[in-house]
């Protein structure tokens, strides 16, 4: 393995790699398909990155051993500056990596920019791909074509304080209505706690309320979307979520500006009876004051026994269209996202596998995974597969809508109507 000068040398572990050579096609912007040389890889720098590096080094060592004359140069890039780095890579192929990790909400935008390679045939021919979670598969698909391989998936569920529930004689909420009632009972009995800590800037915590009530963010396909956020069902979900920002649960003055990290920090610090958090929040909660005094269940839906649809976040790994090592790059992509690698990444970083069978095994080994696996199995949702979503997200269209309602500046109808106009403008700006 050829290490980036930015990285320390690491111990390499062995991993048996088997890969069949994918078929090449003409959709690459490079007319070369070199079978040796250096492959450049960009992966995201995580908080506490060493375990991730160890897993990647193991994969790379085996890959280099089975591909004589090939070296892999891995660089870990900060997530915060990825947009600039990726844009520069798309504009200057000579500086671009061959293989890259990217957020699954970035897929459509990167495809529009012409940066990602269409690997539809290779992905279909790859034996392991048949076990990929359907939502994860959606996150690498644009207009029916596949532009990468899912790396891991993340969903949110309901964290609750077992000690508080026991003390107050509370039952775990089975519906969203019971969730609100229970939250207010906790706040009434223990005014020093938020009942259910929520955030006006916590978009992915709010989305399940919209989806559970039958609403959608947008409708359409093929890159042509129209906002549905002002629809009657979506408005019902917005009202249900924003009604939680009251003094008898989570006061607007304190909670309107909170994001997802803020809500988990509050729960971990013992300041809330319940919170909506991800599988990726487990480590932070375990390190907090509530360790040993909490449990997790799927976020309940509108009817008893139902599970609210969660946003399926996560990352993918793809091949850049400019690569001159198409065959090797696709093979490396497959090995970095294989079942064996994802199982190792779960053990090292807690990343939820995108393969159903691997995830089931992880849930059996680590009980905390079970509610998140149940949430995934119940059906998850994804953001519109449009390049316009990046603009909507960065412009804080949805948080602004929630905060306008929470503050009383606008009604649900007015705020969602304004948000719909902004979303349609973003969708329209990208064609």
Image: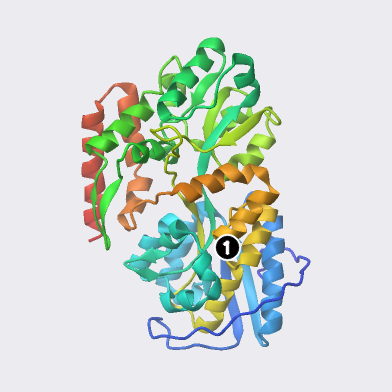
User: Which of 361/382 is in front?
Assistant: 361
The residue at 55%/45% (across/down) is 372
The residue at 22%/49% (across/down) is 425
Q: Quadrant of the C terminus?
A: bottom left
To which quarter of the image does residue 44 belong?
Answer: bottom right
Q: From the image, tell me which residue sits under label 1.
A: 43
As drawn, 423 above or below 255: below
Measured as percent of width and height from the top left, residue 318 is found at: 49, 69
Question: 10 Å neighbourhood of mark 1: few (<14), some, or many (≥20)?
Answer: many
Can residue 74 be seen at all in this image of the molecule?
A: yes
Q: Quadrant of the N terminus?
A: bottom right
Measured as percent of width and height from the top left, residue 192 is found at: 57, 14
Q: Secondary structure at mark 1?
A: strand
As drawn, 121 above or below 258: below
Q: Left or right? Give the position of 411 relative to 165.
A: left
Can residue 7 be seen at all in this image of the molecule?
A: no
Measured as percent of width and height from the top left, residue 297 is found at: 55, 36
């Amino acid at each position: 393995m050829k290490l980036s000068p930015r990285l320390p040398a690491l111990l390499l572990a062995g991993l048996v790699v088997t890969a069949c050579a994918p078929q090449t096609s003409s959709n690459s912007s490079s007319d070369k398909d070199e079978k040796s040389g250096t492959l450049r890889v960009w992966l995201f720098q995580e908080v506490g990155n060493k375990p991730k590096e160890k897993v990647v080094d193991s994969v790379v060592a085996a890959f280099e051993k089975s591909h004589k004359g090939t070296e892999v140069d891995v660089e870990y890039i900060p997530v915060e500056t990825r947009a600039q780095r990726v844009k520069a890579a798309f504009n200057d192929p000579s500086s671009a990596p061959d293989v890259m990790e990217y957020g699954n909400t970035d897929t459509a935008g990167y495809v529009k920019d012409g940066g990602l390679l269409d690997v539809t045939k290779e992905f279909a021919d790859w034996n392991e791909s048949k076990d990929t979670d359907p939502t994860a598969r959606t996150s690498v698909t644009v207009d029916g074509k596949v532009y990468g391989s899912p790396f891991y998936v993340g969903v949110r569920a309901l964290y609750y304080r077992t000690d508080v529930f026991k003390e107050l004689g509370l039952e775990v909420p089975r519906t969203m209505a019971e969730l609100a009632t229970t939250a207010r009972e906790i706040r009434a009995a223990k005014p020093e706690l938020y009942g259910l800590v929520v955030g006006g800037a916590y978009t992915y915590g709010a989305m399940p309320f919209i989806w559970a009530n039958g609403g959608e963010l947008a409708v359409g396909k093929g890159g042509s979307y129209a906002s549905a956020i002002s629809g009657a069902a979506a408005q019902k979900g917005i009202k249900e979520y924003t009604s939680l920002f009251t003094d008898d649960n989570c006061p607007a003055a304190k909670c309107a500006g909170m994001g997802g990290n803020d809500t988990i920090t509050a729960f971990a610090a013992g300041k809330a009876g319940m919170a909506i958090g991800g599988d990726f929040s487990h480590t932070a909660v375990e390190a907090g004051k509530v360790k040993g005094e909490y449990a997790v269940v799927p976020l309940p839906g509108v009817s008893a026994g139902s599970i609210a649809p969660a946003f399926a976040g996560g990352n993918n790994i793809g091949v850049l269209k400019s690569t001159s090592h198409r065959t090797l790059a696709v093979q490396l992509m497959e090995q970095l996202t294989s079942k064996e690698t994802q199982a190792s990444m779960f053990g090292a970083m807690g990343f939820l596998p995108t393969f159903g069978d691997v995830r089931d095994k992880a849930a059996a080994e680590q009980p905390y995974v079970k509610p998140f696996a149940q949430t995934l199995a119940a059906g998850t949702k994804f953001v519109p597969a449009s390049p316009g979503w990046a603009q909507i997200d960065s412009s804080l269209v949805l948080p602004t809508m929630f905060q306008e309602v929470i503050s009383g500046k606008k009604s649900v109808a007015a705020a969602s109507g304004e948000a719909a106009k902004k979303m349609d403008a973003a969708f329209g700006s990208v064609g």
